Image: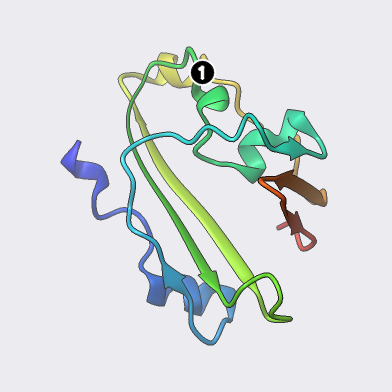
Amino acid sequence: MAALDGLPLSAADSTTIMGASHMDAEQIYQNLDDQSKSALSNPNCTGAFYNAEQSVYAGSGWSAVRNQYSQQGDASDPNHMVVFQAVVAFSSAEDRRQGRGTEGTCGKRSLSAKGKGKGIENTDPR
């Protein structure tokens, strides 16, 4: 669905919003992720941490997705920042309601994940 192509934030927009010095953006993917092998500290908040996760949208009738990861530095950098963004289209509002969303249930919670020998932690949930 071409209508989604221009919706993800640019690296420059992410840099400004996050107050970073420079964020690098990966390519934009057109599929959902499978992070099922990651150990998330609160599995009920999967959609808040992995916003383009297959398990979150399973059975929802989603029809298209644009998914991107941007970061500043790496995990050893004290100024390391990560932005995960996704835009998901549904055939109808009813289809959207079938998904397993986490809106309103995971805000202001610290989450961490460990997978493939590396850990990620969200210590500043907004």
In the picture, measured across the screen, residue 115 lies left or right of residue 66, that is: right
Could you tell me residue 85's position as x and y percent? 48, 52
Characterize the local packing of mark 1: few (<14), some (14-19) or many (20 or more) Cα atoms within 10 angstroms: few
Among all residues in the image, which is located at the extreme left?
2
Could you tell me residue 93's position as x and y percent? 40, 20
In the picture, measured across the screen, residue 111 lies left or right of residue 51, that is: right
Q: Is residue 99 above or below residue 89?
A: above
The image's colouring method is rainbow
Q: Residue at x 48, y 36 (%)?
A: 33
Count of numbered marks: 1
Label 1 sits on a secondary structure element that is helix
Q: Quadrant of residue 83?
A: bottom right
Q: Residue at x 74, y 54 (%)?
A: 119
Check disc 1 and give the amino acid type.
Arg
Q: Quadrant of residue 1?
A: top left
In the picture, measured across the screen, residue 124 lies left or right of residue 3, that is: right
Q: Quadrant of the C terminus?
A: bottom right
Q: Is residue 18 above or below residue 5?
A: below
Q: Residue at x 33, y 46 (%)?
A: 29
Q: Is residue 58 above or below residue 16?
A: above
Among all residues in the image, which is located at the extreme front?
117
Q: Nearer the viewer, residue 56 or 39?
A: 39
Q: Is residue 113 above or below residue 126?
A: above
Q: Residue at x 51, y 14 (%)?
A: 98
Could you tell me residue 101's position as x and y percent? 60, 28
Q: Nearer the viewer, residue 12 or 91?
A: 12
Q: Can you identify the residue that label 1 sits on?
A: 97
Among all residues in the image, which is located at the extreme bottom?
21
In the picture, measured across the screen, residue 54 lies left or right of residue 118, that is: left
Q: Nearer the viewer, residue 64 or 112?
A: 112
